[in-house]
Amino acid sequence: MLCFENDYSEGAHPAVLRRLVETNLTPQPGYGADEYSESARAKIRDTCLSPTADIYFISGGTQTNALVIGSLLRPYEGVVSAVSGHVNAHEGGAVEFTGHKVLPLPHHDGKIAPSELRSFMGGFYSDPNHEHMVFPGMVYISHPTEYGTLYTLSELSAISEICHEHNIPLFLDGARLAAGLAADGAELSLPGIARLCDVFYIGGTKCGALCGEALVFPKGAPEHFLTLIKQRGALLAKGRLCGVQFDALFTDGLYFELGEHSVKTAMRLKAGLLERGYTFHIDSPTNQQFVIMPNSKLAELTGKVRYSFWEPYDNDHTVIRLATSWATEMAAVEELLAILR
Amino acid sequence: MLCFENDYSEGAHPAVLRRLVETNLTPQPGYGADEYSESARAKIRDTCLSPTADIYFISGGTQTNALVIGSLLRPYEGVVSAVSGHVNAHEGGAVEFTGHKVLPLPHHDGKIAPSELRSFMGGFYSDPNHEHMVFPGMVYISHPTEYGTLYTLSELSAISEICHEHNIPLFLDGARLAAGLAADGAELSLPGIARLCDVFYIGGTKCGALCGEALVFPKGAPEHFLTLIKQRGALLAKGRLCGVQFDALFTDGLYFELGEHSVKTAMRLKAGLLERGYTFHIDSPTNQQFVIMPNSKLAELTGKVRYSFWEPYDNDHTVIRLATSWATEMAAVEELLAILR
Amino acid sequence: MLCFENDYSEGAHPAVLRRLVETNLTPQPGYGADEYSESARAKIRDTCLSPTADIYFISGGTQTNALVIGSLLRPYEGVVSAVSGHVNAHEGGAVEFTGHKVLPLPHHDGKIAPSELRSFMGGFYSDPNHEHMVFPGMVYISHPTEYGTLYTLSELSAISEICHEHNIPLFLDGARLAAGLAADGAELSLPGIARLCDVFYIGGTKCGALCGEALVFPKGAPEHFLTLIKQRGALLAKGRLCGVQFDALFTDGLYFELGEHSVKTAMRLKAGLLERGYTFHIDSPTNQQFVIMPNSKLAELTGKVRYSFWEPYDNDHTVIRLATSWATEMAAVEELLAILR
Amino acid sequence: MLCFENDYSEGAHPAVLRRLVETNLTPQPGYGADEYSESARAKIRDTCLSPTADIYFISGGTQTNALVIGSLLRPYEGVVSAVSGHVNAHEGGAVEFTGHKVLPLPHHDGKIAPSELRSFMGGFYSDPNHEHMVFPGMVYISHPTEYGTLYTLSELSAISEICHEHNIPLFLDGARLAAGLAADGAELSLPGIARLCDVFYIGGTKCGALCGEALVFPKGAPEHFLTLIKQRGALLAKGRLCGVQFDALFTDGLYFELGEHSVKTAMRLKAGLLERGYTFHIDSPTNQQFVIMPNSKLAELTGKVRYSFWEPYDNDHTVIRLATSWATEMAAVEELLAILR
């Protein structure tokens, strides 16, 4: 069975696993105070050119999103997000469970438009009834988005500027950041993100780790953030588990290499599908490809290929998602293309 | 440096790690639907003699406690716990963050007394003002307790009976259950616990796993529990991480063996300390030992032994905790005893 | 100064106030157990032809909405509402503060369309990822809506049917129900609403009371609802305050009379404005009228008339809301029409 | 039937009601922006010698407590309270519903001891595990306490000092403040309270109003407090209802007069009971008296006197509460004493 269902079907990259084995029996303090976490933090600070950043490792993306949003917002505030944002659509109400509203903006291939953000913020404060409404207290974006698309440098700069005019933080969800950094034409680098965002995370789960996201506060974390992590159940006793993995991922550029591999395989898949006349729901430069498939063709895939249902397109077509990852072999892509001949 | 600070200083038992390596590249569905999780569930059901139990793997103890308590309680209910219970004292308010009160009962070496529970429940319902108060909606106990002590079968039966008279669930926190099962004189087995409790968990983090607790609902989980896990940020995309580990722990009795090892080393330590005239704050039959140490002696340990401060005893003494684990070598115990001569 | 700003600018109808004075010194039990509350409940049950309804009096609308939604939803559920619904737009995030998401549907002059509700519900359950999403656990509608419009009997029946097919409650916010019952062509009566809804409230604040909404559960309230009211801070010690007022409002048809008065004055205003060539943003049959006003005209009103800004229309026009109430004198309407000549 | 059950059995003081009638038809802006609320605020600021205080009117005590505590605490903080404090015992978990823990201290006749508070705060910060615990983020006291007792000036000063050393606010629940100000030997005045507390409220419900508490922030309210009030459902559309009442209560010293009356009747009752040989559970100088009654005597009261059950004392005695209020007639006290002969 070919597996293009998602980018978290395998375990960890072998180098990551190897490092877990090597360090396994060395006793370490708990809760993220271990030497591996410290080393990983130092490497990430270097890579981000953000020498005083506070960094925490959290086990997964929804956990991280709810923790950041619920901790940074004041009680009368909500988080602005694309209506298609993961926090608005696919996290089982994790943000609302922390007591806060998601304030949805329209999405454009998964992205919010700076001009619409600006007019939303302006409209809010000029509404004479705004004290009866939820204040926009943070902007959340995902990069790559849920549709695999990327913000340009000028878009991120504009969003950052709007946030800072209104004195609210900008939060970038980088669950799939490795693919976003590696994409052809990508304008955003880790130092650029660290400069423009107030908080962001570098996804490990979807790029070579068993679990874990590196949460970075370039300008410093909120007070007593460790207690907030504990309170939300997100503090691993064996913090070393994430520390070791990120230490390995940020050694010798492994993280970037894995991102590049996921994009390279995706681009081969995309090119092959275009050659074969398939059309795409969205033009994604990263590891997620959204293909408009004839339903007849879909039936043929059964038992041969695992993919994700995305949404119905019309009576005869369905949008499916084909995802590659650090673990996708190029041979598997060719095999898939052969099936989709 | 000798390490008796806690039972989560090392990584995973080598057999667990080996299994992670072996299964690493086999693609699996996410979110706990992988074959390793299924296999682990089957083994745990067998071991618990609880063939229809629902089982979920959660990354850590606080996460599990907050999830269970917040999900099962109705909005007007709180959870009854010993005042010393982990959920009341050391989880940064994780239960209250879900909107529920912890209703504290006195503790007796970490345990609640069935008679006091009965009289609390009776007193609540006979108070004419009880509709203005938080209803007791669940009983939480830890076994072993935070003081390393164990409930007897008759105590657990009595508590279970009181819960069921009032139609509220009994929840057992088994973060250190392996040690509790292995202790000399332990009266509670997994099948016994599964019979008397409505929900409990089998701790992996503190017994050989990198992370993970196996949450067991012998009579079935609440509706849409997967969504609740997701909502609280506790759903790992790579559910296999916990599944593989518990599958290894429940193969060939490894889990029980590790628990026995932790108790055996602790009992040697205890016997050695008694011989040397040390006294104990509490008589614990499990892997946590609470020693009343002269402060002068404590000073000598600096730089040689890692231990946990517990609480001041008097002007000249301090209660410290010495913990063993699956990874503690007997030679290290002897070395510690040599230092404490 | 003419006052058409809203329908809560004055105190209580004189008959209501008189009853407060008459009953003032008779001692009564607290928390809604007083004889006036009992009498009001009996009258409301009679009027609704709902002899076993549970009825509670709550001080205001947002309070009632948050209480009902937060109490009835299970933790993994959200409430479906028109995007324009008061709970989604103008309650400062009160629903999210209880931990639940508002699931917005498009609005049509303030109403949700049964067909869109049906397709939303169907779409949710057929989405293979729905376990990662917030379950629709209740439908909220306002009647009259925030735009003054009314559901027809066939619309409410269809919505009720969809809810019951999915086994979720239908909640009707009747903050301005008196006007809705009195409108020309209104198809919904109190017995009809009690038959089709699982919970609704009869607004007092906006129809003759100093404060208070009568919350009706035709099929019975959730268990321990009094405790939930207390927990959310909504339980008045002197429950008599609301009881007396609703008792007066439901004596000799006063409530209906006040609603009729508010509609009659609004209809005279509407007719007069139409004669004068004004256009309306929405065709409302109730006490709120949304007029598209030339900005030049608006300037003339300053210092003479109080109205509510609603939203900008175009560069030269603004939508304003003119509201009448039980207290609006017909002479004031004529005076306003004279100004708007 | 004599009514000594509580201090909220009647409606409002006639002067308060009269003012409601007089102002009834004058249109006013909503949500607390009316002229009566402004006037009441001015009078309260004058009385408190607190010219820049922010003042809000909230409908009841539990509402106010949950609002203040939930709004001022940061997410990792809880509120310190006597174990007997209303917020810990009798508010249905309203504080926990906002996500925060109540951190209980022992009570001494309802009061916390400054020395115990100091040692709790010190102990917290010196505990090496305190980052895993709930931070004390506010101190809550009630004055008079739930047992009718009063803090001395030196006690309140000491508590205030400890709070400010730790940079956390001191919150005084004055639900029955009128009685506390009027008691013989009372050391605390409104200006004194305003000087030593960061936030407090002046109870109206239990002193002459139909509903309402005046919430005072001598040093200013938190940002966007109106939105927080709205969010918790506590913002009355007709804010005038509370404004008018407090305006009347703070005209010509009525509030103080009513407090004095409640204390005078209570002291006559207390003296009479002492003469008759009754003993008291607690020596209360205010309007609540806690009498240890022989159960045989209690039976005699049935049908003649309404009182509150407090708690069992021993097999033959019960503690009951007898409360007076602004509305208690001295003749009723004498009648009660005659019955208790």
Image: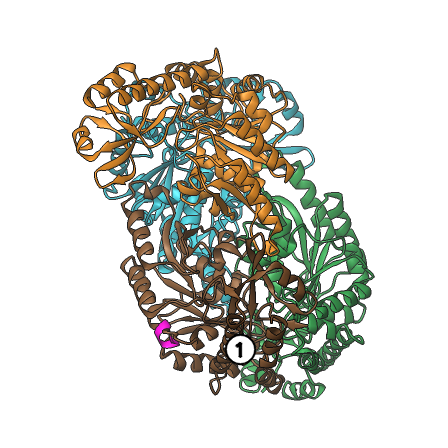
Chain colours: A orange, B cyan, C brown, D green
Q: Is D22 rendered above or below residue D95? A: below
Q: Nearer the viewer, residue C211 or C116?
A: C116
Does the magenta portion include C192? Answer: yes
Numbered circles on residues, count: 1
Rendering coords of residue A95 (x, y %): 48, 43
Give me the residue at 43% from left, 60% from top: C109
Rendering coords of residue B183 (x, y %): 39, 34
In the image, which residues are magenta?
C189-194
**What's the chain of the residue with tag 1?**
C
Q: Nearer the viewer, residue A215 or B42?
A: A215
Q: Nearer the viewer, residue A190 or C313?
A: C313
**Would residue A336 appear left or right of C336 to someone viewing this image?**
left
Does the magenta portion include B124? Answer: no
Q: Nearer the viewer, residue C221 or C302?
A: C302
The answer to whether residue C213 is seen in the rendering is yes
Q: Quadrant of the C terminus of chain D?
A: bottom right
State the residue lying farthest toward the top.
A252
| Main SS class of the magenta portion in the image | helix
**Would residue C61 appear left or right of D71 to someone viewing this image?**
left
Q: Quadrant of the N terminus of chain D?
A: bottom right
The answer to whether residue D312 is seen in the rendering is no
Disc 1 marks a residue whose amino acid type is Thr
Which residue bears the numbered disc 1?
C265
Write down the quadrant of residue B185 in the picture. top left
Give me the residue at 55% from left, 70% from top: C323
Q: Label 1 crowding class (10 Å Cα cut-off): few <14, some 14-19, many 20+?
A: many
Q: Is C80 rendered above or below residue C206? A: above
Mark 1 element type = helix
Rendering coords of residue B56 (x, y %): 34, 38
**Would residue D13 appear left or right of A75 to someone viewing this image?**
right
Rendering coords of residue C211 (x, y %): 57, 72
